[in-house]
Image (tube, rainbow, N blue to C red):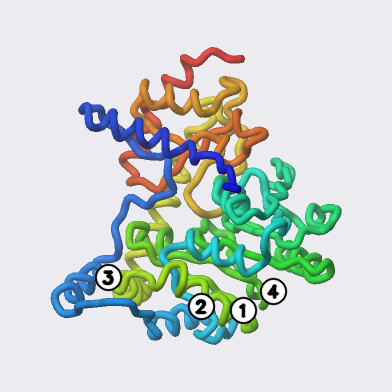
Amino acid sequence: MIAQLEPFHAMAVSALAHRLAAEGRAVIHMEFGQPSTGAPAAAIATAHQVLDSDAMGYWESQPLKARIAQSYRERDGIAIDPARIVLTCGASPALVMALSLAGGPGTRVAFARPGYVAYRNNARALFMEPVEIPCGADTRFQLDAAAIAAIDPAPDVVLLASPANPTGTIIPADELARIAAVCAERGIRLIADEIYHGIAFGSPTPSVLTVAPDALVVNSFSKYFSMPGWRLGWLVVPPDLVDQARARMGNLFLTPPVLSQKAGLVAFDCRDELEGHVRTYARNRALMLEALPDLGLDRIAPPDGAFYIYADVGHLTDDSLDFAMRLLRDTGVAVAPGIDFDPVLGHRFIRISFAVATPLVEQALALLKPWFAAQPRR
């Protein structure tokens, strides 16, 4: 039996965007959470040196694992044995590994709806049972302890994302502690997707490891470090799962690219450049929040982190995919349809990424304002 997965509909929007660009149309890509900046300059310089001097092969960087462990001491004040860190080919394999370590077929995995499309589809691919918990504006589209306590029967796994995709909202530290306590009381394994850590606009983003030391934590160089194409991430696992985690990485994925590991180690020392990217996202966020009411998009949860706006367009459409396609054809601005993140209510939402350069955000808003004004209300 083959697990049946839904497509990632934003891929279809992106494919149309690239076709239009090939025809000579100007396109602004706001459909993916992909920083428009490249890897830090020093990381790129290191990569050039490695290409000239290192034949490379299958290798796992112990210095990089130690540097990741050091980052948890610096940011969260927690000590993690580098042996608990498994380097991966981006966050996607880390998520697959985390789920497979948390259970087998039939395992019930709870997460917020709306949520990242791969949570639902990875669970299904592993023959697990997704348990989607509807989360609305009252909880800023985030799971809370009360919602987890109310799930009956208790799920085997709770998957958190903070900052979240598609909303950018952050779970406050006190609520994160309450969630950890409920999960411990009910015997629920915690997995946390922390790939947007480092990109926040005033709100702290504590790691779940501060309140749940035995959690499985997914992270990546794709977002804060602006290295999505380098396919480098990591998974933090509890001590009793280290051997099985390493067995999964070795058998399923071997090792991350050596070139990426060398560059990633250097990227940790490029904070000034990386914090400059965060300041750009903050400017873009401010521009978006100021302009959205003029577009008629006032039903949002302002993002605390990441680089997304998740906006209700239900007054204009009940088909967010068709809406995104029309918007792209008419304006050249690509956005993601909400059905990727919420199969129930996502037909009335879109997600806009502001991870692009500020002039492109300004250009996109100038194109969107008259287009939205011309759309008939439902």
**First in sequence: mark 3 vs mark 2:** 3
Identity of the residue drawn at 34% across and 74% down:
261
Residue identified by numbered label 3: 43
Q: Quadrant of the C terminus?
A: top right
Tell me the kind of residue under disc 2: Arg
Residue 303 seen by the camera:
no
Mark pair 4, 1: CA separation: 15 Å
Does residue 4 appear to the left or right of 285 in the view shown? Answer: right
Image position, residue 165 (x, y; %): 55, 49
How many other residues sit within 10 Å of disc 3, few (<14), some (14-19) or many (≥20)?
many
Tell me the kind of residue under disc 1: Leu
Mark pair 4, 3: CA separation: 33 Å
Identity of the residue drawn at 82% across and 55% down:
146
Mark pair 3, 2: CA separation: 26 Å
How many other residues sit within 10 Å of disc 4, few (<14), some (14-19) or many (≥20)?
some
Query: Looking at the image, is mark 4 or mark 2 nearer the viewer?
Result: 2
Residue identified by numbered label 4: 212
Label 4–label 2 contact, CB within 8 A: no
At mark 4, the secondary structure is: loop
Mark pair 4, 2: CA separation: 21 Å
Image position, residue 56 (x, y; %): 25, 77
Residue identified by numbered label 1: 241
Residue identified by numbered label 2: 246
At mark 3, the secondary structure is: helix
At mark 1, the secondary structure is: helix
**First in sequence: mark 1 vs mark 2:** 1
